[in-house]
Image (cartoon, rainbow, N blue to C red):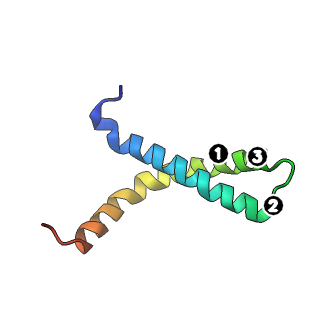
Amino acid sequence: MIPNRYAPAVFAFILSGLMSLMVSGIATFRATGLAADFFSLWIGAWLTAWLFAFPAVMLVSPVARRMVGALVVKD
């Protein structure tokens, strides 16, 4: 198991992977339709997107947390 102190990085890794998978799939489908090589195009686009998405989530998530904290009323 992974130690708890790595939870934010693991969360960012999983979130960025899933989100980039979905978005790249939609973008690839819109660009190519159900082409014969759709799956390989999608995986290539996904891996490239994930390469950028993971560091982006790591950089942007603290800002997003602060923005949510400013917008949400504390109990």
The front one of 17 and 29 is 29
In this view, the mark in front (1 or 3): 3
User: Do the residues bearing badges 2 and 1 touch, measured as CB atoms within 8 Å?
Assistant: no
Image quadrant occupied by the C terminus: bottom left
Q: Position of residue 32 (x, y in %)?
A: 81, 60
Vertical placement of residue 21 versus 64, above or below: above
User: Do the residues bearing badges 2 and 3 touch, measured as CB atoms within 8 Å?
Assistant: no
Type of amino acid under label 2 = Gly
Q: How far apart are marks 1 and 3 (CA)?
A: 12 Å
Mark 2 highlights which residue?
33
> Which label sits on residue 64?
none
Q: How crowded is mark 1: few (under 14 residues within 10 Å), some or many (20 or more)?
A: some
Decide which of tag 2 and tag 1 comes sooner along the chain: 2
Secondary element at tag 1: helix
Residue at the front extreme, as displayed: 34
Q: How crowded is mark 2: few (under 14 residues within 10 Å), some or many (20 or more)?
A: few
Decide which of tag 2 and tag 3 comes sooner along the chain: 2
Residue at the top extreme, as displayed: 1
Q: Is residue 36 left or right of residue 63?
A: right
Image quadrant occupied by the N terminus: top left
Q: How far apart are marks 2 and 3 (CA)?
A: 11 Å
Type of amino acid under label 3 = Phe
Mark 1 highlights which residue?
47
Mark 3 highlights which residue?
39
Vertical placement of residue 1 versus 26, above or below: above
